[in-house]
Image (cartoon, rainbow, N blue to C red):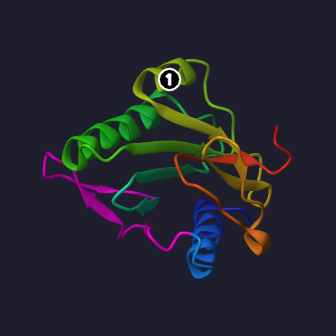
Amino acid sequence: MQTGANYELLARKLIDSLQASGQLAEYEGGSGPRNRMAGASGYKHQIDLSLQSEKALFLLELKYLGKPVGVAELLILASRKADLEARFAPTPVHASLVTTMKPSRNVRPLAAHFGVNIDFVADLSSYALTFDLNRFLGHVESAQAADIVSASFIPANGA
């Protein structure tokens, strides 16, 4: 049965496998309801999945809603990103909204404005991570990384 918790667990396993292999050794990862980061405002934001180093902070918000992601979900992540950017400046903060359904039509232009990636992943087993726009990491069992500049989820078939 596919659920939001399973979706987050699968993503977490991918990150864990990369960290265990030493390929993300410089990054500290966090996930789940207890993964909270205080922004410049002092508010502690819950982050579904995060990777943090001195070089960058990655925020992944995983949405398994059964309906298209809307503007409200995007604006929540955009405000988290802005608050954390203010706290961690000059460290770049990258945010991705990962969803199993294509977002509503107004979301993509707004996401571009706020610098948030929208990543559509059709199911829980057909995804991978990319780094530096060109790097394909593969499935959990065979993940590999290279130079890390930015990250997003992509369908395993590259579509």
Residue plotted at (78% across, 74% down): 141
The magenta segment: 24-48
Is residue 111 a member of the stretch shown in magenta? no
Magenta span has 28? yes
Q: Position of residue 63 (x, y in %)?
A: 56, 48
Task: Give left or right: position of 26 versus 81.
Answer: right
Locate residue 83, reporting x and y percent.
24, 42
Tell me what residue is drawn at x 53 percent, y 42 percent.
97
In which quarter of the view is residue 7 placed? bottom right
Q: Main secondary structure of the magenta part?
A: loop
Q: Residue at x 44, y 61 (%)?
A: 51
Q: Tell me which corner region of the image, top left, top right, bottom left or bottom right, holds residue 80.
A: top left
Q: Residue at x 36, y 44 (%)?
A: 92
Q: Is residue 1 left or right of residue 129?
A: right
* Direction from residue 108 to residue 94 in the image, left or right: left
Q: Does residue 9 sit above or below 80 in this rendering?
A: below
Most distant residue in the right direction: 157
- Where is the C terminus found, in terms of image quarters? top right
* Residue 32 at x, y percent in the picture: 45, 68
Q: Nearer the viewer, residue 148 or 125?
A: 148
* Residue placed most toward the observer, 33 or 80: 80
Q: Is 38 located above or below residue 13 in the figure?
A: above
Q: Quadrant of the N terminus?
A: bottom right
Occupied quadrant, residue 31: bottom left
Circle 1 sits on which residue? 112
The residue lying furthest to the bottom in this view is 20
Residue type, label 1: Ala
Along the line of sight, the residue nearer the viewer: 114 or 6: 114
